[in-house]
Amino acid sequence: MIISTSLAALAAGEKVTLGPGDTLRLEVSFKYTVAAPAVVTLWASLGLGIGRDIENFLDISLEASTLPKVWRGTIDIPIPTSGKTNGTYWLRAEIQGYGDTQTTIDNAVEITNMPGGILDYLPMLVMVMVMSSIMGVMQEGGRVISE
Amino acid sequence: MEIKVLELDLTTYATGWYQDPNTGQYYYYDSATGRWYVSSLGVLVPLSIPKLSAPKVVNISGGQTLRISYSYKYVGGSLTVTEYASIGRTYLLVYDEKVANSKSRAIGPATTPALYSGTIDLVMPASPDPSWNDIECKVFGGGLELGVNYQDALNVVGVEPQLSEFTIVDYNKV
């Protein structure tokens, strides 16, 4: 099922909600001129902070054109089934190495229902280990008293 | 009514410094190139040719030929002039030509304005720099110089792609 989202609604604060295994499809366009056929790499990514957390890339072949020519196409970002954090991500598309060809939309994507990784259970694991240690000491101490 | 008369001295100048009797300003003339210069902060700067916004932009890439068409009028005695065209870039207000070509032409004598026109072809090298956006065309000889410089007249298309208007059109869950 395709969930359609208008950019106007997104600008007003609406987010696309994604879960594990979902795919986000971006439609991108730009103009170019080049004297000979060339290949550029389009990157699409999602991020929580400074770095890119989920990403994909697509090599695009450009035909030679001295007059500005429009390229328009799509790139998918598959959402992993695990290992990512639930939260609100920015969305970015860019062609690295070509000046101002970077567009970022803040708070564009909400990722939910992502299963927790081992780090999410770390506080519980620490608590269990502490409790185990305390129980061990108490049992050992009981034996000393009984002797 | 006072009639003002403009007299143009078509004497062939020798290389050296000359002083404008009206302003006192000194100018340097180079007979080899037929160009006048003015001293600015110890640097000889060619006398300015007006820099205008180009009326159109031509897309051009390495190996292609730019043809510049021009015309001018002349009144005076017999004279051999150089018609000169170039492609270059303007840096710190100074035009730096990169590709140039020229023709010689014998003109005059003429007592009424005579129209001369012509074309000059400029061949771009294989890998032109994208900053070579300006063109200049002029005619000079006998101490005269007349020309015009068009800024941003060219869009130089190199082997490196030039991208613009990059946009995320839309995005959806699929």
Image (cartoon, rainbow, N blue to C red):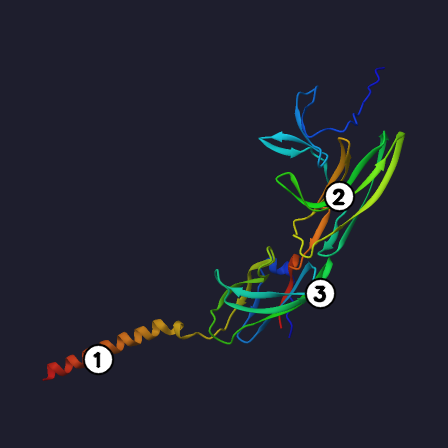
Residue displayed at 64% across by 39% down: B94
- Reading the chain from its start, which is encountered first: label 3 or label 1? 3
Which residue has dot 3 on it? A63
Query: At numbered mark 3, what does the secondary structure look like: helix, strand or loop?
Result: loop
> Gap between marks 1 and 2, in whole Å?
94 Å
A125 shown above or below B58: below
Q: How many marks?
A: 3
**Chain for mark 3?**
A
Residue displayed at 71% across by 61% down: A70
Indicate left or right for B111 with B141 as reference.
right
Whether labels 1 and 2 belong to a single chain: the reply is: no
Question: Residue A101 in the image: x percent, y percent?
Answer: 61, 58
Q: Residue furthest bottom?
A: A147
**Chain for mark 2?**
B
Q: In front: mark 1 or mark 2? A: 2
Q: Residues within 10 Å of mark 3 (few under 14, many from 20)?
A: some
Rendering quarter of residue B8: top right
Which residue has dot 1 on it? A136
> Gap between marks 3 and 2, in whole Å?
32 Å
Question: Residue B11 in the image: x percent, y percent?
Answer: 78, 27
Front position in the image: B1 or B60: B60
Indicate left or right for A73 with A46 as reference.
right
Rendering quarter of residue B50: top right
**Chain for mark 1?**
A
Question: Residue B172 in the image: x percent, y percent?
Answer: 62, 68
Which residue has dot 2 on it? B85
> Gap between marks 3 and 1, in whole Å?
72 Å
Front position in the image: A74 or A7: A74
Residue displayed at 40% across by 72% down: A120
Q: Amino acid at mark 3?
A: Glu
